[in-house]
Image (cartoon, grey):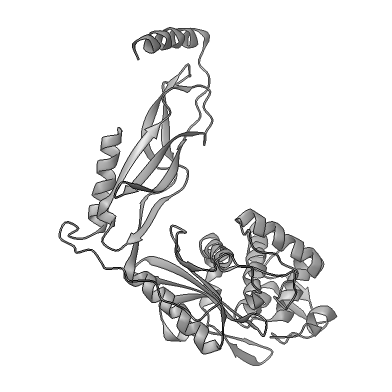
Amino acid sequence: MNITTFAKRLSLLVLLATPMAGWAAETMVPAPPQLAAKAFVLMDGASGQVLIENNADERLPPASLTKLMTAYIATKEIESGNIKETDQVTVSEHAWRTGGSRMFIQVGTQVSVSDLLHGIIIQSGNDASVALAEHIAGSEDAFADMMNTTAQKLGLTNSHFMDATGLPNPDHYSSARDMATLARAIIYGEPKHYAIYAQKEFLWNNIKQPNRNLLLWRDKTVDGLKTGHTEEAGYCLVASAVRDGQRMIAVVFGTNSEQARAAETQKLLTYGFRFFESQTFYKKGTELTKSLVWKGSESEVKAGLAEDLTMTVPRGQLKKLQASMVLEPQLMAPIQQGQVIGKVEVKLDDKVVRTSDLVALNAVEEGGFFRRMWDSIRLFFYGLFN
């Protein structure tokens, strides 16, 4: 497929994604809402694009938003088989004595990993967080090391964790952008366990506690994620919602009340859904074209995207997107699967708004002696005339 064909296919997808695109009036995008919060971020879930931000990278106390990382690691440990949801965890005195919000587990009793996970996500139990951290890593300090290692892998550059709960500590901090990134990893990385974040209440030890995310009651499109509050941090919230197949992730730090964090977060979600739209044009691994390979056992290599090509733009502008594809001019074998061999550029009004790597979808081994010799001759003459 040549560049023109690729661009036509992309344009066709845009037309299909935007009914009556030729006649649709562009949406007037007003200035973003001003929030009564120390920091905030609005992110499109599919693309990961940050649409609105304010003090997004400021290092702030995350309070119980910390438990997003605690729960994320726990689900990854379950996924990898290191622990099971049915494992029985013996509650230590350290976990039992941990202050703040509680699941009300009792020292010396055994609680399943599944119940602890629910207690962390829904009830924001500090005792449950410590108990599960100790079960996974042996101690809360060792678990904090796992948290920081995981943060680095996820690219959370303004986060550092000292405990599994988010209780105040001067060396324990995160940022609005980092929390949005972590939320996205939770949503798309563990869809099975993500359903827990939408549960409105959880009963344990004959004590029924509600999820503190008020948006779960106010907006049926909201399906998570987590609240946080300490005197130092103020009232914080990471929330996500899906409307008409589009997902938004909103984060607010440092509002002044439980009602305020819900209201300010709702402003972000409303703005995002009203004025932006996203579209996934191609999935990673989809063959987009073939490229000529010199001196290889095969003459061509399949090329596709290393990551999904998803764009988020103001409503009415999808039809303006134009794509071009550039391949390396002379690819020499051997070619490794996943090797970058070109790029796709997406432009909006002649401005590049997205660049994605084109990679080899299959390996091409080096050809035999005569193939390499013949291609060397061809390349010699090719160089003379080009």
Of residues 158 and 31, the one drawn nearer to the viewer in this rendering: 31
Of residues 98 and 79, the one drawn nearer to the viewer in this rendering: 98
Quarter placement of the C terminus:
top left
How many numbered tags mark residues here?
0
Of residues 38 and 106, the one drawn nearer to the viewer in this rendering: 38
The residue sitting at 82% across, 68% down in the picture is 139
Q: Position of residue 209 (x, y in %)?
A: 61, 89
- Seen in the picture, residue 116 relative to 157 is either above or below; the reply is below
Q: Position of residue 354 (x, y in %)?
A: 40, 48
The residue sitting at 74% across, 73% down in the picture is 170
Q: Is residue 82 visible?
A: no
Q: Image check: 369 left or right of 114?
A: left
The residue sitting at 64% across, 74% down in the picture is 62
Quarter placement of the N terminus:
top left
Q: Position of residue 369 (x, y in %)?
A: 52, 9
Furthest-left residue in this view: 23
Of residues 198 and 247, the one drawn nearer to the viewer in this rendering: 247
- Seen in the picture, residue 263 relative to 292 is either above or below; the reply is below
The residue sitting at 40% across, 42% down in the picture is 286
User: For residue 254, which quarter of the picture?
Assistant: bottom right
Q: Position of residue 372 (x, y in %)?
A: 49, 11
